[in-house]
Image (spheres, coloured by chain):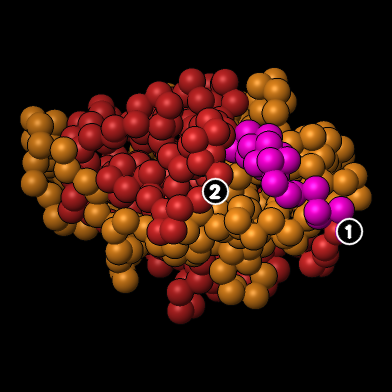
Chain colours: A red, B orange
């Protein structure tokens, strides 16, 4: 799909910087892969998904999602969870290519910010697919939310679960991008500087056997958050 | 669950509630009750607030705030019908791609899901170590759009802390 254009020459001289800056304006509010968001999600730190990861290790699939909102609260501290008992967190898995979830793994938290337990359910077929959700019946794995550097994990029926504070896994020289946008720089530095170094997120991580899900090459995954 | 076990669990939860309790066990025991009765979410129909598939799609390829909220509440099954044209328009205006290339890029990222594919890493799934920003920049300024080498990498190639080799994989958090 690689393609080049005869008019690429327009990216030359001063015009280059202007067009590049205009182009990068699209990233102007990007503070992570999705660390800032539309007004509804961005005003809702507990439900604002920053990143989603999916990868295979051995015979297992690992799914992870992080929540944070750099604009609202750049410094996520240890000791106080930002998970909200009024938010349902979901991993969604499609196995037949129609972009409709066939399986979900749900997670909801109970307790107060310094003493929460996260309850995972699934993978099971959703009670309702699409932009609405209901808590499903199914296998349950609960784990205390980790609010310090020692991760508390649990495993139930082959699924490992974790919920708690970790280093923000995203890396990106956002600061240099803002310099470019502001006209103080014409490109990225080499080496760049990771704007997200030193920041924390709250994360959900599950690891489960691929045998529960099907042929990995046919799977697609995404994540959603829901409220009352 | 027996009454004695229920009482023990209550005592444990009460003790945990006293504050920061050093805990390096494996979480709760397998005999814990189904917690649904404790959740405010039980029996409710819950409305979507946010969704996430590919990194950067909503932040880079949508513009108006109202469009972002609509996108966050969207579902992959309707992505192409609802958002392909508007994403293409934003890509054209913002990144200078011509309509055919912008359409192709929008089509590439929709529906907004992570396909595990050949498991080789982003955009075939997403490993923690994958440099997704460089990939997205290269898609815009090279693969689909005019080639601009200076904008294809931010030259940050790895996380600030090493990822764990074991579950939960994410690196340890930062203390104040």
Find residue B92 and report its image quarter: top right
Disc nearer the start of the sequence (1/2) = 1
Q: Is residue A222 visible?
A: no
Magenta stretch bounds:
A6-27
Reply yes or no: does residue B60 show up in magenta: no
Reply yes or no: does residue A8 show up in magenta: yes
Within 10 Å of disc 1 (Cα), the crowding (few <14, some 14-19, many 20+) is few
Direction from residue B176 to residue B32 in the image, left or right: right
Nearest the viewer among A202 and B173 is B173
The residue sitting at 79% across, 34% down in the picture is B93
Task: Classify mark 1: helix, strand or loop.
Answer: helix
Up the image or down, B149 lies above or below B101; here it is below
Q: Which residue is mark 1?
A: A6
Find residue B3 and report its image quarter: top left
State the count of labels.
2
Give the farthest residue toward the bottom.
A58
Q: Which residue is mark 2?
A: A187
The residue sitting at 83% across, 35% down in the picture is B89
Q: Is residue A148 visible?
A: yes
Main SS, magenta region, reads helix
Task: Classify mark 2: helix, strand or loop.
Answer: loop
- Work out whether disc 1 and disc 2 sit on a shared chain: yes
Direction from residue A87 to residue B122 in the image, left or right: right
The residue sitting at 57% across, 21% down in the picture is A40
Within 10 Å of disc 2 (Cα), the crowding (few <14, some 14-19, many 20+) is many
Nearest the viewer among B98 and B106 is B98
Figure quadrant of the N terminus of chain A = bottom right
């Amino acid at each position: 799909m690689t393609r080049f254009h005869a008019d690429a020459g327009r990216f030359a001289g001063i015009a280059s910087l202007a067009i590049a800056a205009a182009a990068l304006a699209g990233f102007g509010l990007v503070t992570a892969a999705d660390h800032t968001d539309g007004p509804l999600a961005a005003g809702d730190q507990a439900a604002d998904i920053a990143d989603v990861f999916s990868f295979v290790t051995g015979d297992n699939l690992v799914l992870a999602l992080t929540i944070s909102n750099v604009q609202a609260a750049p410094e996520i501290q240890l000791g106080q969870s930002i998970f909200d008992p009024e938010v349902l967190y979901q991993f969604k898995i499609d196995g037949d290519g129609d972009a409709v979830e066939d399986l979900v793994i749900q997670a909801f938290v109970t307790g107060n910010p310094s003493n929460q337990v996260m309850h995972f359910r699934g993978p099971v077929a959703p009670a309702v697919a699409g932009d609405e959700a209901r808590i499903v019946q199914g296998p349950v794995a609960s784990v205390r939310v980790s609010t310090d550097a020692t991760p508390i994990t649990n495993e139930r029926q082959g699924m490992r679960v974790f919920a708690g504070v970790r280093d923000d896994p995203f890396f990106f020289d956002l600061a240099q991008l803002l310099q470019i946008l502001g006209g103080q720089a014409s490109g990225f530095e080499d080496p760049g500087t990771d704007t997200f170094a030193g920041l924390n997120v709250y994360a959900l991580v599950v690891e489960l056997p691929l045998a529960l899900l099907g042929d990995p090459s046919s799977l697609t995954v995404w994540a959603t958050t829901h409220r009352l | 669950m027996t009454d004695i076990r229920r009482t023990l669990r209550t005592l444990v939860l009460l003790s945990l509630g006293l504050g920061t309790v050093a805990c390096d066990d494996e979480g709760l025991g397998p005999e814990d009750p189904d917690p649904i009765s404790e959740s405010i979410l039980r029996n409710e129909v819950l409305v979507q607030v946010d969704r996430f598939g590919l990194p950067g799609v909503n932040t880079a390829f949508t513009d108006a705030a109202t469009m972002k909220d609509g996108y966050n509440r969207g579902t992959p099954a309707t992505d192409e019908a609802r958002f392909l044209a508007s994403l293409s328009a934003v890509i054209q205006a913002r990144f200078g791609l011509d309509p055919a290339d912008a359409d192709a890029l929008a089509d590439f990222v929709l529906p907004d899901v992570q396909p595990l594919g050949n498991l080789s890493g982003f955009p075939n799934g997403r490993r923690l170590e994958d440099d997704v920003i460089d990939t997205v920049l290269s898609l815009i300024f090279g693969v689909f759009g005019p080639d601009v080498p200076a904008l294809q990498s931010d030259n940050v190639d790895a996380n600030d802390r090493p990822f764990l080799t074991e579950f939960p994989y994410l690196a340890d958090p930062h203390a104040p």
